[in-house]
Amino acid sequence: MANNRKKGITLLKILFSFVLLYFVFTKIQFREVWDILKGSNLGYLFIALLFFILSKVLSAFRLNLYIHQINIFLTQLSNLKLYLLGMFYNLFLPGGIGGDAYKGYVLKKKYEVKTKSVVSILVLDRLNGLLLIFVISCVLALFLDEGRLQLYRLLFGIAIVLSILVFWLFNKRFFSFVYPVFWKSLGFSALVQLAQLISVLFILKALDVEGNNIAYLFIFLISSIVSVLPLTIGGIGSREVVFYYGALWLGLDENTSVSISMLFFLITATVSLLGIIYHFRKPELEEIPA
């Protein structure tokens, strides 16, 4: 029964992804988008790929900080292999076990830690990343040349301080066992988002986009928040919708905006597909020698 329910939810996600993509492509010129993609500079796209990989390596390092706090001292290499396998499961096997759930299952099975502890570090790791996306989005909003946003500059500044303060208190009050790595994990999250923003900047260069960089980066960050919502498969469709409406709102070219979204997804899928290696040959988890 539970398996049928999971399959049903997955089918709905796939259907919703296709509906969103269909909606977007009825609003833009697909041939123009295709021409934009074909004319992209492969050299710049390769650099964008490298920075995306760097962002995922840093993200894996952040997760390992949390894992160490529950007395599982995985080596960085073991953690990277497990993280890459999780990326593959999240994107290519949505009907099966999710990437985060699989990582939690492996850690609990091998090291017999409490389920609550494993779930806590996985959730906190996600929240940590989302917090920095929100913070950087607010920072970029301060520099956007958009009249309606300028009215709320003070609120954006308050939101930055308040969100960090609330998350700090939340960690200190309810998750004291991971509190020692709070600022270090936040620093890793900042580096993760910086690497991804640089990746998007090189996608912009690959498409020969001049100007409006802040606006495109702002849309990208908002799409990253939306894509986390468990409504579609790997954020497919939801990210494109955000890029489309973001372009309309900020006076950008919709075709170019959607092209950026598609290229970023292709880069994500390319890296995630590498995790198939560890699907067939499960990684051996090794700990740092005492």
Image (cartoon, rainbow, N blue to C red):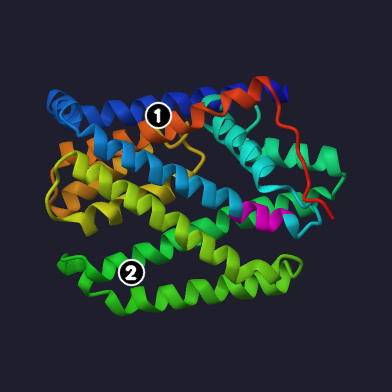
Q: Position of residue 60 (x, y in %)?
A: 59, 48
Instruction: Please state which amino acid type lies under the numbered disc 2.
Output: Val
Q: What residue type is disc 1 on?
A: Ser
Q: Callout 1: helix, strand or loop? A: helix
Identify residue for label 1. 17
Q: Can you give x and y, in whole percent of width and height, for residue 111 in the image?
A: 85, 44
Quadrant containing the N terminus is: top right
Instruction: Please give the range of residues in magenta.
Output: 62-67
Which percent across, then down, holds residue 215? 22, 56
Q: Is residue 264 above or below residue 159?
A: above
State the residue in front, 225 or 37: 37
Which residue lies at the image location 77% right of the left edge and 52% below the top edge? Answer: 73
* On screen, residue 8 above or below 194: above
**Could you tell whether 204 is left or right of 93 in the image?**
left
Does 268 appear above or below 119?
Answer: above
Q: Is residue 95 visible?
A: no
> Which residue is disc 2 drawn over?
139
Name the secondary structure under disc 2: helix
